[in-house]
Image (cartoon, helix red, strand yellow):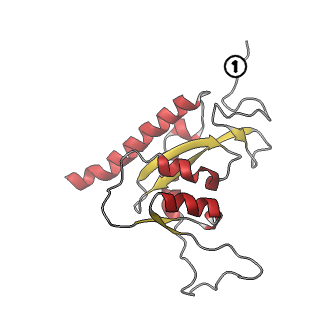
């Protein structure tokens, strides 16, 4: 019996395996991690989905996947997102969770992007999440997905997240 890869067949739905048609790899099925981090790139929540889903479609799931409940004090929670999240659905998802969204507006014919250095232009903060993804990619088991089932892959991702948090917070307790 031939072994099936975790990517399954080309064009398969892949929803139970958290896979989907990868637009950058000739339509082969692939997976992606959607990551929520704090200001120091420490992971707060991770959600798996198919490679064909845009990150903005996963925003509500990621915000609900935070394991440690955020404090319920009166301090406002800030959420920095990039231009890809500038949709009414994303803004509503953030507002229902009592957060303040910092999302730069998309460029349009009526409102082009402000010039660099203009106070109206949001500074890029995407590097924080990219650092978090780089920390996950140091684990070979996550860099190349070998598991067929999404639950097994999610277990490895959560284990890696726990190790990353421990490595970043352990030096602070000494």
Which x, y percent locates residue 17?
A: 63, 31
**Side (left or right) of 161 relative to 143:** left
SS under mark 1: loop
88 up-or-down from 47: above or below: below
Furthest-front residue in this view: 96
Residue in the image at 62% along x and 53% along y: 55
99 up-or-down from 25: above or below: below
Check disc 1 and report the residue beneath it: 3
Furthest-top residue in this view: 1
Q: How many marks?
A: 1
Residue 109 figure quarter? bottom right
Crowding at mark 1 (Cα within 10 Å: few <14, some 14-19, many 20+): few
Which x, y percent locates residue 42?
A: 40, 54
Q: In which quadrant will I find the N terminus?
A: top right
**Side (left or right) of 172 relative to 130:** left
**Side (left or right) of 13 relative to 96:** right
Residue in the image at 32% along x and 65% along y: 74
Residue in the image at 75% along x and 49% along y: 24
Nearer-the-camera pick, 73 or 171: 73
Which x, y percent locates residue 157?
A: 49, 39
Residue 9 figure quarter? top right
Residue in the image at 40% along x and 61% along y: 40
Which x, y percent locates residue 163?
A: 38, 42
4 up-or-down from 39: above or below: above
């Amino acid at each position: 019996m031939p072994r099936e890869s975790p990517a399954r067949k080309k064009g398969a739905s892949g929803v139970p395996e958290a896979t989907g048609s990868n637009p950058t790899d000739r339509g082969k099925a692939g997976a992606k991690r959607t990551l929520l981090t704090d200001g120091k790139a420490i992971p707060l929540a991770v959600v798996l989905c198919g490679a064909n889903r845009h990150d903005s479609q996963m925003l509500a799931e990621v915000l609900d996947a935070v394991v440690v409940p955020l404090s319920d004090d009166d301090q406002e929670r800030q959420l920095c997102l990039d231009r890809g999240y500038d949709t009414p659905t994303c803004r509503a998802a953030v507002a229902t969770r009592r957060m303040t969204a910092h999302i730069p507006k998309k460029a349009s014919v009526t409102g082009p992007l402000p010039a660099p250095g203009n106070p109206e232009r949001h500074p890029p903060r995407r590097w924080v999440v990219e650092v978090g993804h780089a920390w996950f990619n140091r684990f070979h088991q996550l860099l190349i997905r070998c598991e067929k089932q999404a639950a097994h892959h999610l277990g490895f991702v959560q284990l890696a997240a726990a190790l990353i948090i421990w490595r970043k917070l352990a030096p602070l307790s000494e």
